[in-house]
Amino acid sequence: MKNLLANHKSLLLKITFCLFLFFVVDVIHAQKSSARIIVDMNKGWQFVKEEKPTENSQWQTVQLPHTWNKDDVMDEEPGYYRGAAWYKKTFAVGKELNDKQISIYFEGANQETEVFINGKKAGEHIGGYTGFSIAITSLIKYNGTNELLVKVNNRHNKNIPPLTADFTFYGGIYRDVNLVATNKIHFTSDSGSDGVYITTPSVTSSQASVQIKALLTNSTGASTSVFVTSTVLDKAGKKVAAKKSLLQVKAGYQQTLLQLIDAIKGPKLWTPENPYLYTVETKITDEKGKLLDLVINQLGFRWFSFDANKGFFLNGSPYKLVGASRHQDYKGFGNAVPDDLAIKDVVLLKEMGGNFLRVAHYPQDQSVLKACDSLGILASVEIPIVNEITETDSFYHNCERMQVEMIRQNYNHPSVIMWCYMNEVLLKTQFASDKERQKLYFNNVTLLAKRLEALTRKEDPSRYTMMAYHGNIEQYKNVGLLSIPMVAGWNLYSGWYGGTLEDFPRFLDGFHNAYPGKPFMITEYGSDADPRIRSLQPVRFDKSVEYTTHFHQYYLKEMLKRPFVAGAMIWNLADFNSETRSETMPHINNKGLLEWDRTPKDPYYYYQAVLSKKPFIKILSSSQINYGVIDSTDGAVYRPVQIASNLDSVALLLNGEQSILKVQDGLAEKRLPFKGGINTIIAEGKWKNKVYRDTITTQVLLSSYKTINRKTSFQPMNIMLGSTRYFIDKEGAWWQPDQVYKKGSWGSVGGKKFKLENNSRLPYGTDKDIAGTDDDPVYQTQLTGIQQYRLDVPAGKYEVVLHFAEFLGGKSQPIPYNLGNDEKEPKEKARVFNVRVNGKSFLQQFNLAQEYGIAKAVTRSTSVVIEEGESVIIDFEPVDGEPVLNALQLKKLDEVAAKN
């Protein structure tokens, strides 16, 4: 990882900037011969989150990258700070730089930024996801202290995309900041780029050409002649070809130079398997040979095309593009993610076997695409027009400027093959009650799309364009958006937000048959996998890892057998923050193959099994559910063990008993008996006479149907009612689903699973954010109308803990991404009831809504002594409406005391 990161660091000088004058002067002296100086400005900032700081403001010391929303997007208060904040730092510049052009380069600040030097405004930038350069030469003091003051605002602004989206709009200077010093004759910082653009007009396996477009600025006040030399170097640093041009640069002007290096023989082609990178050094020298400026870019020789029937081709060979989209935030960092962690994401995608990254829904740090270049990951990049537009000239202008900045800043990455500009832009319905007004709105969306398409093709005719649609063909057809981009992208969630899995292949075939000449990719697909939730009966929207693994297996199989589906982009590479979400893990979209901290989930290993070229075998985590009810005469519980592998078959051993399993579509599975205590699972297979193996151990806690006669010690019981899933809480304790009471065992008497009315998504329970807990799934399901809960247990003293939450009542904000979310807000109902434990009154006139409110975690506990032959009996008596119970825990206190 460190080597990869080092390889992606700029070859230009990057020195540490200090606040003290003598240090700056010393460093500049030492590097005086350098044509372009890049100075790290990340350290020593002061920050305050206020609209207008005063002399009493409490500034705090921070380092960049920084966001002020790292914590408030995860608290229980709805919303997060969206407003202004200020950053400031002081720095000194030695007189040795007084003949230089000085600027501050921001790699990213979200989303409105104003920059001041010594109290005077130096410049501003609109948009949160592209870099920008602010010239400060005329405002700085040499041999003195300068103050850099930056105002950043992430407020909602109707003229700046994104307007709404299923991700968090973090505020802050969340990427690196550098001071850049150049000579007065230098390459122009053009829309945040370095002013040098490289294309390969012709590439074959035998010969290639390179075109360099360079923008030069002369700030000397006098016209002069300079030489511009571009040199192509191979990976070893050996010169391959060069072009030298003489140019007369006029004073005060920006000029453009085109160079063509043709007839490069036998180029080494850039491919996912061998992403060979050349280096292009472009420099300006004066007539005496003095170096004035130098820009270094990487170059990959490749050609590519899309075919509507056969898919994608790279260098003449067919490739099925399989990969993922990526959001840029990370647990503990928000969106202020260090470069090494951003690079790690691309490494994880490569190790999975992926060959494509959809950089979505906005341009990201340069380190991401540099890693794609080096690792052989093809990519698309897009600007954040998501869900909707604003019909103003300012909005249109900002969209066009963002598109230009995105293209120019990422132009030289050989990994990039597509530029994109809209995602599900018709998802959020506008003017539904006024059809004429809606028609005008749709027309304006189409006009903007046409403007962006024309702009993109003009900026870069060498790459494809793409728009991502949600799964409504007729709507996009009628509005006129289907015909605009070169490639169609479809975001499809059949079998998740709505419909069935079988609807997915029907859509693929239906679209291809209706539009046989249109290349298309699946730009999003996936389902939520809360890593804490497991199920032996996985169903749609239960958030279990098992359902999501099955979902991905089904989708990928259908896409792989259809060559006309050019690509499959999983949504998402990793879990990401979406502050408005509730569900089992509030504020987190759990569709990632990796957790928010990048811990792999089972679906990641499934893709690794299918896509990896090396032998692979992995026992999936569903095998580690450590709670169970004995369901066999031999005192064991039968559980499915699932293996991800690309071998033909695997030998599976559980506690020494072997089974041979055939691998189908990347997975093998068999139900096996787990005993109480430690269980060892071994999966192994052979490839070319070499054995590949994976081993796990899991401790299983068994509950017996004959608990009275239990010879082993009593295990604490954590039970969720109204659910068929398992859950592991923040303390590492497993919760198991309820069962109907059977004599000699335990379970509920009476009641039914809570299910929201008119809800086509949730199989049971609610998706409300439950306040007062991080273990939301414990409280998000319940039995309504429960009469009794009974547990036939050995004699002793027990703690009984009951968990409640009221679901009915309150209001939720509708969220457009929840396709199929057609339920009406559940009406409040009376729920007043009494609870007795072994005949003794425990809760009287218990009214959840009145006493605690809606969607609040409520825990009530008591203790009870059980004599030989007795049971723990919890009775529920309705007073007004139905009694409810969400979860319960039972712990044997005298056994705990004995252990202590």
Image (cartoon, rainbow, N blue to C red):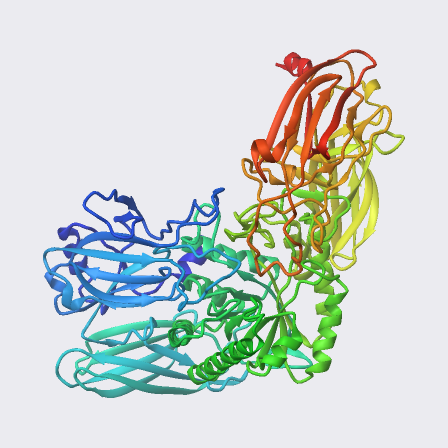
Query: Where's residue 219, x and y in %?
Result: 17, 78
Left or right placement of residue 605 versus residue 419 in this view: right
**Hey, which residue is sitting farthest right in the picture?**
633
Classify residue 470 by image quadrant: bottom right
Residue at point 30%, 65% (across, down)? 12
Above or below residue 759? Residue 448 is below
Residue that appears at 21% across and 47% down = 54
In this view of the protein, can residue 640 be seen by the observer? yes
Q: Position of residue 594 (x, y in %)?
A: 58, 51
685 or 856: nearer the viewer: 856
Q: Is residue 304 above or below residue 570?
A: below
Q: Is residue 266 above or below residue 544?
A: below
Q: Quadrant of the C terminus?
A: top right
Picture coordinates of residue 566, whole percent (x, y): 64, 74
Q: Residue at x 64, y 43 (%)?
A: 828
Give the percent coordinates (x, y) of residue 593: 61, 54
Q: 115 or 761, which is in the foreground?
A: 761
Total count of labels: 0
In this image, 195 relative to 327: left or right? Answer: left
Q: Is residue 689 visible?
A: no
Left or right: residue 460 versus residue 731 is left
Residue 636 in which image quadrant: top right
